Image (spheres, rainbow, N blue to C red):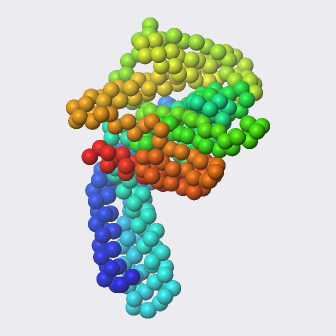
Amino acid sequence: MAVVDVSEELKSLSSTMESIEAVLDLDKLRADIAVLEEQAAAPSLWDNPDEAQKITSKLSHLQAEVRKAEALRGRIDDLGVLFEMAEEEDDPDTRAEADAELVSVRKALAEMEVRTLLSGDYDAREALVNIRAEAGGVDAADFAEKLQRMYLRWAEQHGYKTEIYETSYAEEAGIKSTTFAVQVPYAYGNLSVEQGTHRLVRISPFDNQGRRQTSFAGVEILPVVEQTDHIEIDESELRVDVYRSSGPGGQGVNTTDSAVRLTHLPTGIVVSCQNERSQIQNKATAMNVLQAKLLERRRQEEQAKMDALKGDGGNSWGNQMRSYVLHPYQMVKDLRTDHEVGNPEAVFNGEIDGFLEAGIRWRKQQEK
C-alpha cells in the first residue's frame, strides 16, 4: 500500500470515528455515568435488589461503551505513528504489524458503527426471547433447543446476563417452547433482527431410515416493558392456571404447583413462567412477559399504520429469514441479507455477530 493511500485511509477512519462519537454523544454518556455512580454509591442501594441490579448493570454497560470508544480512538491515533515508524526505519516487520492493526481497526470500527444504527424507540432496552418449535415434529423440537443454546452461548460469550423464565420440554427430545431474558442494554436492538422463522435441513437423527428432514422454529424478540409504556392489564381479562413445573423426562423442578400460565382473553396471548420458587413470583414474571407481548403488538400495529401511509405493502422482513443446511452441504444463510457462513457448528455455538450486524444494516436500508 502506498504511503498516500495509508494517509487517506487514516483520515477516513478518523472521520468515521468522529461520526460515531457524535452519535454516541460521549459527553452525555459520561454525565449519565456520573449520575449512576452516585446512585450506585448510595448506602440504601441494595434495599431494592432489582433496582440495584438495573443501576449497576446500566452503569457497567455505559462505562464499557465509553472505554470502547476511547480505546478505538487511541488505536486510530496510534496507527499513524506505527506507519511512520515503519516508513522511517524501513522495517518490514513493523509495516506488517501496522497493516494487521489497520485491518483490525477497520473491523472494530464497522462493529461500533452498527451500534449507532440502533436508534429505534425500544432498541436501547433489554430483550425477551421466545422460541417455539413449528413444523417438523421431533426435529423441530430439537432445532428449537439448538436455537436456545445458540442465543444463550452468544450472550455468555459477550458477558451478558440471561435468565430463563420458562421451558416446555418435548416428549422425545428438544423443547416445545422457551422464554428467556437477555439483561443488557441494547439487547433488543441487536437481537430484534433475529425475529422470524428459522429453517433447518439435515439428515434426521430421529429417522431410522436416515432421510433428510426439513424443520422449522419461530423466534420472537420482545422489548422489556418500562413504567413509561403504560401497558395496563385488567385482571378480569386474565385466566390464571397453576400447574407443576417439569423438566426433561417429566421430572418435577418444583415440589409444589408453583408454575403459572396466563391467558389474555381479549388477544388469546398465552405466557408461562416456572423458574421461580413461588407462585406469586412466577405470576409477576409472567405478567412482565405478557406486557412485553402486548407492547410489541402495539408497536407492530403502529408500524402497520406507518407502512400504510407510506404505501408500503408491509415490510414483513420477519417471516422465513434464515436457513441452516447440514446436508447435502454445510451452510447457514440469511435470506434477507445474503450473509452466509460455511460452518454451522460455529453458528450454533453462538457465533452470530456477523448475522446481527448484516441484519441491522439491512433493516436500516429498508427504513430509508
Identify the residue shown where x is 42% and y is 57%. Answer: 111
Would you identify the image quadrant in which residue 241 lies? Answer: top right
- Image vertical order of residue 92 relative to residue 109, above or below: below
Residue at the extreme right of the image, as rendered: 208
Comparing 25 with 100, the one in front is 100
Residue at the extreme left of the image, as rendered: 309
Quadrant assignment for the N terminus: bottom left
Identify the residue shown where x is 51% and y is 10%. Answer: 239
| Residue 275, position as x, y percentages in the image | 62, 27
- Image vertical order of residue 143 relative to residue 281, above or below: below
Comparing 334 with 38, the one in front is 334
Would you identify the image quadrant in which residue 303 lies? Answer: top left
* Residue 276 appears anywhere in the view: no
* Residue 293 appears anywhere in the view: yes
| Residue 30, position as x, y percentages in the image | 34, 52
| Residue 313, position as x, y percentages in the image | 30, 34
Identify the residue shown where x is 47% and y is 42%. Answer: 321
Identify the residue shown where x is 40% and y is 89%. Answer: 87
Would you identify the image quadrant in which residue 89 lies? Answer: bottom left
Residue at the extreme top of the image, as rendered: 236
| Residue 34, position as x, y percentages in the image | 36, 48
- Left-right relation of 102 to 216: left
Comparing 228 with 289, the one in front is 289
Tally of numbered tags: 0
